[in-house]
Image (cartoon, rainbow, N blue to C red):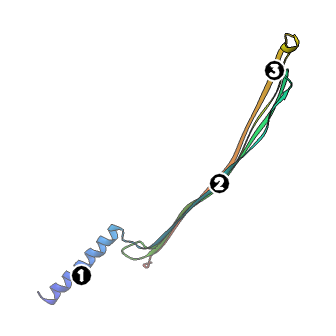
């Protein structure tokens, strides 16, 4: 094989490898992933039944729950992502928080006059429920690429 044939074959092999690496998505670089969630629920249980002898009762109770949380999920990747040259970086992530409160309350009273010969039996109970929550989540996305050819 002459020198010209060897040169043409070498250039063809290098060009083929360059095209194959470009279409295959060759990548040399590093990436990190940060993912964490913090949170908890705290319950407060207040009150209870209040007996008044054998004829009457009182009831007062309240249950309060507080829920909170913070989370983040960040992914970063940087390196040489293109077989034909260039460098790049990609950052994606989510940041968020939540805060919630629930209140359940019960109040009531009752009377039974049978022990005294009074044909009277009454009771009244009311309940209240409230639930509120606030939350926010932000999404981050950033891509930077630099090519050596203008």
Residue 119 rendering spot, x and y as whole percentages: 85, 10
Q: CA distance from mark 1 to mark 2?
A: 60 Å
Q: Is residue 111 left or right of residue 83?
A: right
| Residue 140 visible in rendering | no
Q: Which residue is mark 3?
A: 123
Task: Say whether disc 3 or disc 2 marks the residue closer to the N-terminus.
Answer: 2
Q: Quadrant of the C terminus?
A: bottom left
Residue 47 rendering spot, x and y as whole percentages: 80, 37
Residue 139 rendering spot, x and y as whole percentages: 58, 58
Q: Nearer the viewer, residue 62 or 48?
A: 48
Q: Nearer the viewer, mark 3 or mark 1?
A: 3
Q: Which residue is mark 2?
A: 39
The quarter holding residue 125 reads: top right
Q: CA distance from mark 3 to mark 1?
A: 97 Å
Q: Which residue is mark 1?
A: 11
Evaluate if marks 3 and 2 touch, with contact meaning CB atoms under 8 Å apart. no
**Secondary structure beneath label 1:** helix
How many discs mark residues in the rendered view? 3
């Amino acid at each position: 094989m002459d020198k010209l044939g060897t040169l043409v074959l070498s250039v063809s092999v290098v060009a083929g490898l360059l095209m194959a690496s470009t279409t295959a998505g060759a990548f040399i670089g590093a990436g990190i992933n940060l993912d964490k969630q913090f949170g908890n629920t705290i319950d407060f249980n207040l009150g209870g039944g209040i007996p008044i002898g054998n004829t009457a009762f009182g009831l007062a109770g309240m249950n309060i729950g507080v829920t909170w949380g913070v989370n983040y999920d960040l992914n970063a990747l940087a390196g040489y992502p293109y077989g034909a040259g260039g460098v790049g970086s990609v950052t994606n992530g989510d940041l968020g928080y939540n805060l919630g409160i629930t209140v359940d309350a019960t109040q009531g009273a009752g009377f039974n006059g049978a022990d005294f010969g009074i044909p009277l039996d009454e009771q009244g109970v009311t309940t209240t429920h409230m639930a509120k929550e606030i939350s926010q989540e932000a999404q981050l996305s950033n891509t930077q690429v630099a090519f050596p050819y203008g």
